[in-house]
Amino acid sequence: MINENNTNNTDNTNTDNKPEKTISYYNKQAIKSFFLCFIPSLIFLAGYVHSGGSFDEGSGGAIWWLYFPLLMFVSPIVILDSIYTGIVGLKGNRKFFSIVSLLVNISEIILIIMVGLNNK
């Protein structure tokens, strides 16, 4: 007697792995976005600690001349990359990381706009 269940089992296409790969890609993008969103805040915090909390050039705020170009050149690139990877990461299972990173990026952009408006 021939077992009919085993006759055509050699054509396994293994299509179940494809969605797992795309989900893991989106999860990696969400985690990347989460870590990238804190880089501008860390740069600002490092400058604030090194200056001793002062923004005056005479007392310790002169260190901002070193941190300001770093903030101006690194932060926009990192913020835009974090927003892009956060939006891409919304398709995966780890939407929490993407949502948190997008909220942090939005708050950083609002803070930059408010500081720019107050200096006029």
Image (spheres, rainbow, N blue to C red):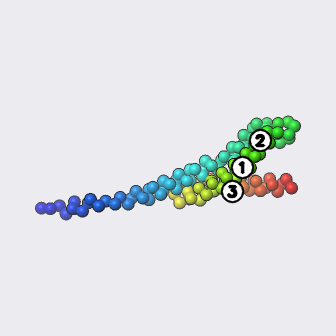
Residue 19 falls in which quadrant of the image? bottom left
Residue 90 badge: none
Instruction: Name the kind of residue labelled 3 in the image.
Output: Ile
Label 2: how many Cα within 10 Å (few below 14, some 14–19, many 20+):
few
* Earlier sequence position, callout 1 versus callout 2: 2
* Earlier sequence position, callout 2 versus callout 3: 2
> Could you give the CA–CA distance between mark 2 and mark 3, rounded to whole angstroms?
25 Å
Q: Position of residue 22 (x, y in %)?
A: 47, 57
> Could you give the CA–CA distance between mark 1 and mark 3, rounded to whole angstroms?
18 Å
Instruction: Name the kind of residue labelled 2 in the image.
Output: Leu
**If the image is split into quadrants, where does the C terminus sit?**
bottom right
SS at mark 1? helix
Horizontal side of 25 relative to 42 (left or right) equals left
Q: Check disc 3 and report the residue beneath it.
A: 106
SS at mark 2? helix
Instruction: Name the kind of residue labelled 1 in the image.
Output: Phe
Q: Nearer the viewer, mark 1 or mark 3?
A: 1
Q: Check disc 1 and report the residue beneath it.
A: 73
Can the viewer see residue 102 in this picture? no
